[in-house]
Amino acid sequence: MFLTLQTNSYEMSHKAGFVNIIGSPNVGKSTLMNRLVGERLSIITSKMQTTRHRILGIVNEEDYQIVFSDTPGIIDPGYKLHENMMKFVSEAMKDADILIVMTDIYESTEKLKGRIEKLAKLEIPVLVFINKIDQSDSEKLIQQVEEWKKLLPNAEILPISALHNMGADFILPKLVELLPEAPPYYEKDELTDRSTRFFVSEIIREKILLQYKKEVPYSCEVVVEEFKEAEDIIRIRANIMVSRDSQKGILIGHKGQKIKDLGIASRIDIEKFVDKKVHLELFIKVDKDWRDKEDKLKKYGY
């Protein structure tokens, strides 16, 4: 899954570019990228801060290559971790050939004014996708489209439902139309910039977000310490890093039941992802206040 920069020469009839997706938490950015790429690369839950990293997903056809970038939801930082996550968003706005701004039918344009002012100054194509239209009535949707047209007159506004594939058929043709002429940036058989280890850690983190409440899921980081692949099985050992000692007991649960349930749920999805039997061991370790320590954040890929 590692990316390899492509250096082969292509005729200039080939198009390629970076299409970066930004927006608030839980508006459907990851669902959209997974839909467009055709693979489940970004984990999805209903909780904020599910996406922490910038993840590339690549769509390849003979005459074009689209490099999508999923980014963390835009928030007001509470920890250094959040500050570093927001740097991923800033980078995405700077290096995009096309920028997709995700919103949904519930999000007020009023609270986005500061963000919209920055978007209005961009000199690249901007597409605003109003998501979750399956949950809206036509009158409300028309009003929202008109508001966005006034705020970003040069942007194209497209109502969609990423989950139910409503409006999604128009997205790829529109992006290809807007792409600059360029050779492919990566080999044509590449799908993402991340390793299998990364996706294993993300699957485990997704299950933590789904199975635990309050602050605990947000205090966890998953590190795959061992990944040994044999002919018929993959043996994985992963550490779940937490910020405080008290969180260890919450993760383990009564008589170890919670960590057992976490391991089972994680293993099932990892086996689907790698298409092979998996033996998974989980360990919990304390890395005190790791979310506010720059050296720790760098170590964990932030």
Image (tube, helix red, strand yellow):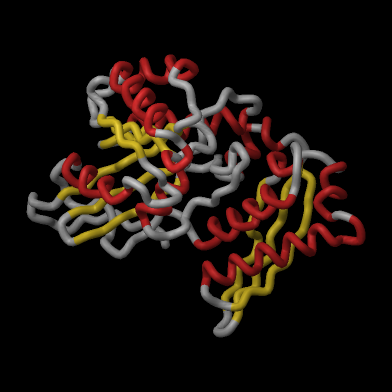
Q: What residue is drawn where x is 82% and y is 44%? A: 247
Kindly tell me whether residue 119 is visible in this rendering.
no
* Quadrant position of the N terminus in the picture: bottom left
Residue 175 shown left or right of residue 99 in the figure:
left
Q: What residue is drawn where x is 47% and y is 46%? A: 30
Pick out the residue farthest to the bottom: 231
Residue 192: x %, y % from top left: 40, 56
Residue 183 shown left or right of residue 24 in the figure:
left
Looking at the image, which is closer to me, 200 or 108?
108
Looking at the image, which is closer to me, 104 or 24?
104
Q: As displayed, is residue 66 above or below residue 89?
A: below
Residue 233 shown left or right of residue 175 in the figure:
right
Looking at the image, which is closer to me, 244 or 127?
127
Examine the image and state in which quarter residue 130 appears: top left
Kindly tell me whether residue 10 is visible in this rendering.
yes
Examine the image and state in which quarter residue 119 appears: top left
Pick out the residue farthest to the right: 255
Q: What residue is drawn where x is 60% and y is 56%? A: 201
Residue 46: x %, y % from top left: 60, 43
Residue 19: x %, y % from top left: 31, 41
* Quadrant position of the C terminus in the picture: top right
Residue 145 shown left or right of residue 8 in the figure:
right
Q: As displayed, is residue 113 above or below residue 158?
A: above
Q: What residue is drawn where x is 52% and y is 67%? A: 273
Residue 300: x %, y % from top left: 60, 45
